[in-house]
């Protein structure tokens, strides 16, 4: 069977090259006579893998020396708790609510202190990013979701938080465009969109923020424990870290973030330009805040939405159903989605418009 174009929001497409490399190394990794899945996390070959993954992520994102890189477990959802448990000092933080994930992060932080929802775009079903937000000067940090996977919005500019550390959920657009890490206190991202299969969460934290935690913090949720043990406090998901290394090698080979960003702009523009000129399809997000990764769109009624999704599936465009809170469709076009996939989808949308307009 041919591989399909998988527009899923995550887990999602991985670069074919990385998958093929994993396939070729599956049974006997570099002459060890075993797969990476069977290897001790304390062995020399695995140590080389995790070190290489860290140095590639540092190089690709331009991470300054005074930041620690950690590969953790429990998904981005666990970070909703780890961030307040480790960053609360006065037990106060500001959250901008741009969708379901930001809301969940704020709810979790409310369990341990005062998580203040200082702005929200819920009034328009999260179709925009709140601007010129005023932050409370006594905040331990400000939390934002950089790209909103469900609603298809993204920050094109980081909010100015002055001296208050900025915490960024980068799950659905990490490595998709340039990001000045030095302007951010802590970044976290679940792997299953742009990094690797599900199983690890990448955390990049400024060293001065991770030395303390609330007394109640379980050992496994303390950044300083993971930082000191170089992400090997307990057994990590070794194979996922290996896959991350392969994906990062692919990103580097493709020309790094600059090239990947240019391609992502080209891919998303193909869809947005079509949507802006279509008499049948409609985008759901204000133009200036559109995501490069998740493109939601709707047809005039649910019968047409259903028909579109069914016909698309027959042609090998899968997982296009939108999240229930937006309805319609969502094309997630992460780094591994080739331009060809988006071009073919747009061609199909044009045909569908002619036949159903
Ligand atoms: C922006 C964002 N944050 C957090 C999450 C939750 O991630 P996880 O399933 O790894 O806990 C997701 C999942 O899709 C997401 O898109």
Image: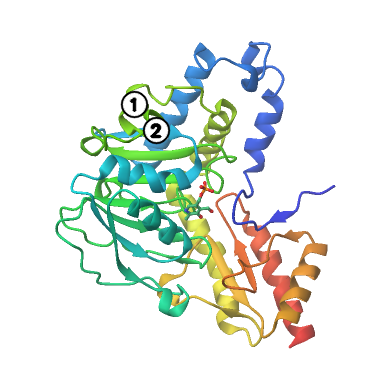
> Which mark is nearer the camera, 1 or 2?
1
Q: Residue 169's spot in the image, x, y percent?
A: 40, 52
Residue at 21% across, 50% down: 140
The answer to whether the beta carbon of the residue marked 1 is less than 8 Å from any atom of ligand 1 is no
Q: Circle 1 is placed at which residue position?
A: 225
- Could you tell me residue 268's position as x and y percent? 54, 65
Residue 65, picture quadrant: top left
Q: Is residue 40 above or below residue 149?
A: above
Residue 139 is left or right of residue 100, and the answer is: left
Of the numbered discs 1 and 2, the one sitting upstream in the chain is 2
Count all numbered tags in the image, as a single digit: 2
Q: Give how far across and how far down residue 339 sits, in percent.
A: 62, 58
Query: Dividing the picture into quarters, in which one does residue 63 lie?
Result: top left
Q: Are marks 1 and 2 in contact (CB under 8 Å)?
A: no
Answer above or below: position of 13 versus 103. Answer: above
Q: Residue at x 69, y 67 (%)?
A: 345
Label 2 SS: strand
Is 44 on the left-hand or right-hand side of 203? right
Q: Is residue 84 above or below residue 96?
A: above
Q: In terms of depth relative to the viewer, which is nearer, 320 or 92?
A: 92
Label 1 sits on a secondary structure element that is helix
- From the image, which quarter does the C terminus lie in? bottom right
User: Looking at this view, is 66 or 62 the one in front?
Assistant: 66
In screen coordinates, is 136 left or right of 339? Answer: left
The residue carrying pointer 2 sits among few (fewer than 14), some (14 to 19) or many (20 or more) residues within 10 Å by Cα, namely many
Whole-Å distance between the Cαs marked 1 and 2?
10 Å
Q: Which residue is mark 2?
A: 70
Looking at the image, which is closer to me, 2 or 150?
150
Q: Is residue 151 left or right of residue 350?
A: left
Q: Is residue 144 visible?
A: yes
């Amino acid at each position: 069977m041919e591989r399909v174009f998988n527009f899923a929001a995550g887990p999602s497409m991985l670069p074919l090259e990385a998958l093929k490399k994993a396939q070729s190394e599956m049974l006997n990794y570099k002459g060890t006579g075993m797969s990476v899945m069977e290897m001790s996390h304390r062995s020399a070959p695995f140590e080389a893998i995790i070190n290489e993954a860290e140095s590639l992520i540092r190089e690709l994102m331009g991470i300054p020396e005074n930041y620690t890189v950690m590969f953790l477990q429990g998904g981005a959802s666990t970070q909703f708790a780890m961030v307040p448990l480790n960053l609360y000092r006065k037990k106060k933080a500001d959250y901008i609510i741009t969708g379901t994930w930001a809301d969940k992060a704020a709810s979790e932080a409310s369990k341990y202190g005062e998580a203040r929802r200082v702005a929200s775009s819920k009034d328009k079903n999260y179709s925009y990013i709140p601007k010129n937000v005023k932050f409370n000067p006594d905040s331990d940090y400000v939390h934002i979701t950089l790209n909103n996977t469900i609603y298809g919005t993204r920050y094109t500019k980081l909010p100015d938080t002055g001296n208050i550390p900025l915490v960024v959920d980068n799950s659905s657009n990490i490595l998709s465009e340039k990001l000045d890490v030095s302007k951010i206190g802590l970044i976290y991202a679940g792997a299953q969109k742009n990094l690797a299969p599900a199983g690890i969460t990448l955390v990049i934290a400024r060293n001065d923020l991770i030395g303390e935690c609330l007394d109640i913090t379980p050992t496994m949720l303390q950044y300083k424990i993971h930082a000191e043990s170089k992400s090997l406090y307990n057994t990590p998901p070794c194979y996922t870290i290996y896959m991350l290394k392969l994906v990062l090698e692919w990103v580097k080979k493709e020309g790094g973030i600059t090239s990947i960003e240019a391609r992502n702009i080209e891919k998303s523009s193909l869809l947005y330009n079509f949507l802006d000129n279509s008499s049948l399809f409609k985008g759901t997000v204000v133009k200036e805040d559109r995501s490069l990764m998740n493109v939601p769109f709707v047809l005039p009624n649910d019968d047409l939405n259903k028909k579109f999704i069914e016909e698309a599936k027959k042609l090998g465009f899968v997982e296009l159903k939108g999240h229930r809170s937006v309805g319609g469709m969502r094309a997630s076009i992460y780094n591994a989605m080739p331009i060809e996939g988006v071009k073919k989808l747009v061609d199909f949308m044009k045909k569908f418009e002619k036949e159903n307009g």
